[in-house]
Amino acid sequence: MSFQLSDLVIDSATETGRVVDAMREQVLGRLKKRGVVLGLSGGIDSSVCAALAVKAFGSEKVCAIAMPERDSADESLALAELVARVLAVPLVVEAIGPALDALGCYRRQTEAIREVFPGYGEGWRCKVVLPSVLDSDRISVSRLVVESPDGERTEARMSAKAYLGLIAATNLKQRVRKLVEYTHADRMNFAVIGTPNRLEYDQGFFVKQGDGAADVKPIAHLYKTQVYALAAHLGVPESVCQRPPTTDTFSLPQGQDEFYFALPYAAMDACLYALNHGIPPAEVGAVLGLSEVQILRVYRDIERKRVATRYLHEGPLLVQAVNEVG
Amino acid sequence: MNKPMSDTISDPVRDALSGPRDALRAFILDQFLAGADPSSLKDEQSLERTGVIDSAGMLELIMHLEETFGFVVEAEEALPSNFDSINNLVAYVGRKRDAA
């Protein structure tokens, strides 16, 4: 039987039950914690995780935290507040801008960007983009896009030093958020939820010791389209479901599919699923309206990212196993 | 009259021009495979698929080519056929030098 998008369809009620059971066993049974903490970004993944957590533990055992900073979209906090209200979960708002400022996040970002655009400063905005893998076999070479205060956009290839400096500075955001989450988790003897979906988890779209750090990751096995299906089943507000996925990390608006993924999430899901199930590129292309060559390029990009981000999944490496503590 | 190239360039650059394969191998071994047996780097192996070079490494490699060989790597030239093995890099450098 040939590949169809419906191959990714799940029974949302059954899957919700399975995830909720696993969360209870993991958090209460294995980790011996009394509830869960999670960062609520106003996006689909954290909203679904929050809804699952409420089903698993009850709203009084869920601590949701919104952590806006200077470059967060205004709607992120509003959507997080809406989700918390709908789920009857108290929302802690921790503005992390001052902490990021004290750590030099914004200064370091500016210094890195000035390696490429010396005039960059107050009032300017930026983002990092990658070329589309669909149009050619081009290697992913990151490019920096800046917008001057009068709205003029310029784009240039980054030096390795500028790229690494900008990413390191920006990763402070995810790491500070996780630090705040664990502070509340320690305070309440709760576990911390990580919210990656399968696409993000598989492709290493997370910051090590940042959003990649967590005690449980309840939707890491679910394709993004399946997360949307759970969202509908769990009653996540429509405004969250309709919001385009965003990194919400750089000062210019940036879609995940221009920063990291080759295609919008639904097509990306289909390609990842098809690659995982050995489905020929031509079959996938016929469904997505893309050529066999384009799907092959996406397959190669998926495999390349798996290689490049393998270390993100590694825990600390020991010289010798310490078997007494597993 | 233009000076001969050998009078206008530094020793490391002259070395690189005389032997781009050796220069490129040395750069990749030094930057991306510190401590590895040099014989483990095959001239035909994919640098990206075998995890030798990641996205930041590719930026380093591009800058190294530009600084060492004195040409500009255009965005549309960042292709596996130019960059994804020592053999491809050597051929690419040769084509760029011929076109200069």
Image (spheres, coloured by chain):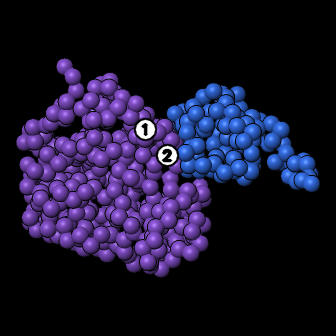
Chain colours: A purple, B blue
Left or right of A47 on screen, residue A123? right
Q: Which residue is situated farthest in the top direction here?
A: A1
Q: Is mark 1 on a helix, strand or loop?
A: helix
Residue A73, position as x, y percentages in the image:
30, 69
Left or right of A252 on screen, residue A168? right
**Residue at point 35% right, 31% down?**
A291
Q: Residues within 10 Å of mark 1 (few under 14, many from 20)?
A: many
Q: Are marks 1 and 2 in contact (CB under 8 Å)?
A: yes
Q: Can residue A7 be seen in this view?
A: yes
Residue A229, position as x, y percentages in the image:
14, 45
Residue A103, position as x, y percentages in the image:
48, 73
Please give the chain letter of the residue carrying mark 2: A
* Residue named by callout 1: A301
Type of amino acid under label 2:
Ser
Left or right of A42 on screen, residue A202? right
**Residue at point 17% right, 56% down?**
A241
Q: Which residue is situated farthest in the front direction here?
A: B1
